[in-house]
Image (cartoon, rainbow, N blue to C red):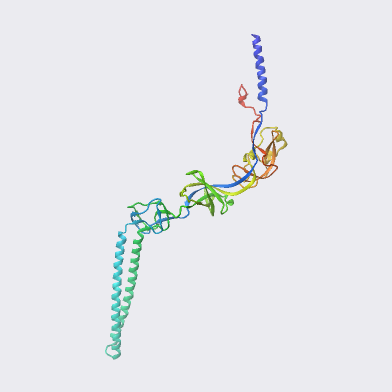
Amino acid sequence: MKKYLILLAGILLIGGVVGFFFYKRTPEISYKTAKIERGTVVSTVAATGNLSAVTTVQVGTQVSGTIQKLYVDYNSRVKKGQAIAEIDPSLFNASVEQSQGNYLSAEANLQKAKVTQTDAERTFGRNKKLLSDGIISQGDFDAAETALQSAKAAVKAAEGSVAQTRGSLMQSKTNLRYSVIRSPVDGVVISRAVDVGQTVAASFSTPTLFTIAQDLTKMQIEVSVDEADISRIQLHQKATFTVDSYPEQTFRGNVIQIRSAPIITQNVVTYVVVVTVDNSDLKLKPGMTANVSIEVAKKDGVLMLPPAALRFKPKAKGDEAKGKSTGAGDRSGASGQRPAGGKGGSGKGKGQQVYLLKEGKPVAMAVKTGIANNNSIELVEGDLKEGDDVIIEQVGGDTKKKAASSPMGRPF
């Protein structure tokens, strides 16, 4: 029995010694690398916006009444001057008839006043001769002269009445003409806000009955650009965008306008940038949400670093390469440092470094970066060349003991 106990104790002792040295040893370190390549770096500014027609006209009504007829519907193509709706013209026709009658009556009164004036002129001329011959008195002559002046004033009043009734007639005819609503432009109806039988009232503000897009083959996107990026936007820069309806297709456009008026929402300042779009195939529709990338910088044939290379920092304590660059890795900020210029930025990186893998060990190299995007960063300065392997990740090298490594659990 003692032999078995001694044998068991020996096995446990050997196992303990083996386990101690196994868990005590430093895990093997390995590195993942990526090659420095030469290619094109494109820096972009990302923004979102909504598609709209370049010219959108809201068609209303200038008279009140009940919609009697509709000649167009959604997506109807219309020409300038084409009738698109009609308001019940009964009241307007009656108004025209009434104004016409008033106008004719005023003209008749004018003719009557002119006849009276002519008679008064004849009487005045005759009395003037009779007065010179001493046949009539001065009083009779004065009465004839007064009658003539009164007749002339009556003609003026009749002429004013004719002008007034003529204006009323023109107004009635204009209202009758406005009862037929016509398209002001060539385009496509994208919105209809009325139905037959609906009453519309043109009071202080003209109601919108139809919205017509003048030309859907040319569209635009009004994107909101953050104030931190607006200085990098210039006219005629190229832009690409996608819409949810066609996630696999990329559309292209150009910056045509940068508006200076700020838009402040919850203390966030943005500016509107207008991007024009060719929509000859009519795939894009007004209101679609577009995810836009505006190209603000582009360089061809430059050395490119992967962003992960600037974020890498060796972990293991006492590492030979880290010892050679004492304090350099800590001061440079290579670990966790964003690519130059920030998100898709174009600023120049200073005091940065990456690590090359030489003889299985990381060696720090100082670099200076230029424009960047999410996939690559321009290498401006540094003792690196195309094909060099830069470290992007370390596997192993953690010397800390894990609590689960002890069969007895965490020590007290």
The image shows a total of numbered marks equal to 0
Determine if residue 22 is in view: yes
Q: Residue at x 64, y 13 (%)?
A: 8
Q: Is residue 392 above or below residue 199?
A: above
Locate residue 295, reporting x and y percent.
57, 49
Q: Quadrant of the N terminus?
A: top right
330 and 231: which one is in front? 231
Determine if residue 139 is in view: no
Q: Residue furthest right?
A: 324
320 and 242: which one is in front? 242
Side (left or right) of 273 relative to 13: left
Which quadrant of the view contains residue 385?
A: top right
Q: Residue furthest bottom?
A: 133
Q: Residue furthest left?
A: 135
Side (left or right) of 264 relative to 39: left
Q: Quadrant of the C terminus?
A: top right
Locate residue 115, reporting x and y percent.
28, 78
139 and 171: which one is in front? 171
Locate residue 105, reporting x and y percent.
28, 70
Locate residue 308, reporting x and y percent.
62, 39
Q: Is residue 7 above or below residue 293?
A: above
Q: Is residue 8 above or below residue 197?
A: above
Side (left or right) of 53 relative to 14: left
Q: Is residue 135 above or below residue 47?
A: below
